[in-house]
Amino acid sequence: VAEACRRRLTEALTADAAALQAALSEAQRLGLHCREARRARDALLALENSDFRRRAGIVVDEAVEADDWWKLQAAMQLVVGGGGDAEQVRRLKEAMRNQKRRQEAVRELRKAGEARDAARLRTAIEAAMLVHVRQDDVRRAREALKALDVRPALFERLRRASGGGDVAALREAVEAARQ
């Protein structure tokens, strides 16, 4: 019986994790402690480690693609907790730095828009484009900049229309300002 178990352990070395697990369970039931059992345990650990690294790689790829702070954090915990592949840790750190830069750029877009400072908004838009901020955020900032650029001309038009006494010109200036 022990010799048959040793043979199954040796055969399982070339099989998958399930076959290794089954052979190791049988050896444990028999109380068999031999070189074949140690090799099978080592092979099972190597297979499990390889599977873990593969799954961790998938999680890292998904987190980097999602560009979500919490997913990046979770992926980092998984990689570091599992022994950490240096390349995956490097990718995650870089993705986290880039994500932080994008968040700062979006924050500056918002602040510049709130301050109604055209020059600051132009600079913020350029910086946002350099760090690849989402197009929706850049589009909204450009629309705000366009409104800021038109504002002085509209103000001048309203001033002239209100000073001239022409009611029709005043209505046109007000309508243009509303748009």
Image (tube, grey):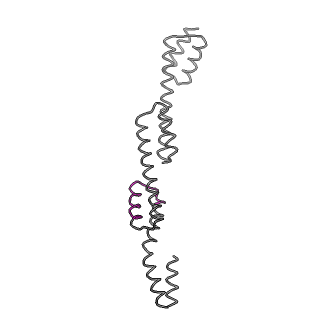
Residue 42 picture location, percent across and down:
48, 20
Question: Going 43% across and 76% down the picture, which residue do you hit?
Answer: 152
Residue at the outermost bottom position: 165
Question: Going 41% across and 44% down the picture, which residue do you hit?
Answer: 94
Magenta stretch secondary structure, dominant? helix
The answer to whether 60 is drawn above or below residue 25 in the figure is below
Question: Going 46% across and 45% down the picture, which residue do you hit?
Answer: 64
Viewer-closest of 158 and 68: 158
Residue 62 picture location, percent across and down:
50, 43
Magenta-drawn stretch contains 113 = no
Viewer-closest of 4 and 158: 158
Residue 10 picture location, percent across and down:
50, 15
Where's the N terminus, which quadrant? top right
Numbered circles on residues, count: 0
Residue at the outermost right position: 29
| Residue numbers of the magenta segment | 120-137
The answer to whether 114 is drawn above or below residue 101 in the figure is below
Residue 161 picture location, percent across and down:
47, 87
Magenta-drawn stretch contains 127 = yes
